[in-house]
Amino acid sequence: GASGSGGQRMVQMALSQLGNTGGEKYWSYMGYSSRISWCASFVSWCGNECGYSTDVIPHFADCGSFRTTFEEQGRWHNGNAYGGTYIPTAGDLILFNWDSSPGATLSHIGIVKSSDGAQVHTVEGNTSDSVAERSYALGSTTIIGYCTPPYPQAELTGGNNAEMIFNYLLGIGFKKAPASAVVGNLYAEGGSTPDGDIDIHSTEMGYGDGVGMVQWSGGRRTAFLNYCEQRGQPFPETGLEVQIDYMLLEFNTDQWIWSSIGAEYGSQCNISKEAFMNLEDVDFATRVWCAKYERCHLRNSHLDDVRIPMARAMYDSH
């Protein structure tokens, strides 16, 4: 599947286009002088903007050519309604036929954002003539199947967990300030190892039941532990890449919301994911991540004595 930074980068590129209507930038990229059905052109454009060769994301303006190409490569999976058992992951391509006929001409293509095993969440071009997010039951008869592009695997480069997280986030499109902000927040969540690195295997002692580098707790803890099992790395043996992938899965689905707890940090923190990823102020980025992703009460946040200082340290040293 499309695990690792390659698939995540494709998702981030697609999300950056939310709300665009008409599709001219996508169908004109494919060489057309007037409007065509542009869902496939959107996928092709995203792949090109990510810097992927056509060996990874082919350039097609029709859906059927994607299926044919990936079938020839052994990278096609039938939908669950048609005998498939594959659970899609970030960056996979999802193919539809609105008449629920697997042998007919395909109707539509999108990019998988995530799946929880029951539903699949997507970003699609030319859905009501715009780029938008959608969700479907995994067993929907309109889902004919999935293409799994051969994305470059994640490269966790750096001397410790903090550096590897920082570099990974830069690689999928985060600017330096928000990447540093995430690192600073994780020091306050998972804590530090004896050598001063982010502890990705910590278990909360005393109040709460948090685990891992984010200290996932409650229903988030259960979902995280299930995800680790699915990836074949049950906690506490879960590696860094799996924990980063799950953090980004949450970031891209339902964790980035405005709440009464977030409001404690100030209304200026209520910004979009895309705006956060492009912030230039590391202190403000650290505050925003704590308000909209971590969502811990301000009085308990250690914002000024742990989160911001650790984020500044990462920012200044890189």
Image (tube, helix red, strand yellow):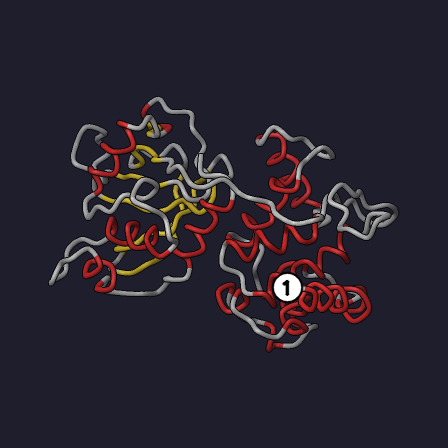
Dot 1 lies on which element?
helix
Is 250 located above or below residue 226 in the figure?
below
Q: Nearer the viewer, residue 263 or 192?
A: 192
Quarter occupied by residue 316:
bottom right
Relative side of 62 to 202, left or right = left
For the point 23% across and 40% down, which residue is it? 98
Is 244 located above or below residue 74 in the figure?
below
> Dot 1 surroundings within 10 Å: few (below 14), some, or many (20 or more)?
many
Quarter occupied by residue 27:
bottom left
Locate the C terminus by quadrant.
bottom right
Q: Nearer the viewer, residue 49 or 298?
A: 49
Residue 251 horizontal/vertical position (percent): 56, 54
What residue sits right under mark 1 in the picture?
289
Q: How many numbered callouts?
A: 1
Residue 298 horizontal/vertical position (percent): 75, 68
Disc 1 residue type (three-letter): Trp
Is 206 located above or below residue 233 in the figure?
below
Residue 147 horizontal/vertical position (percent): 34, 35
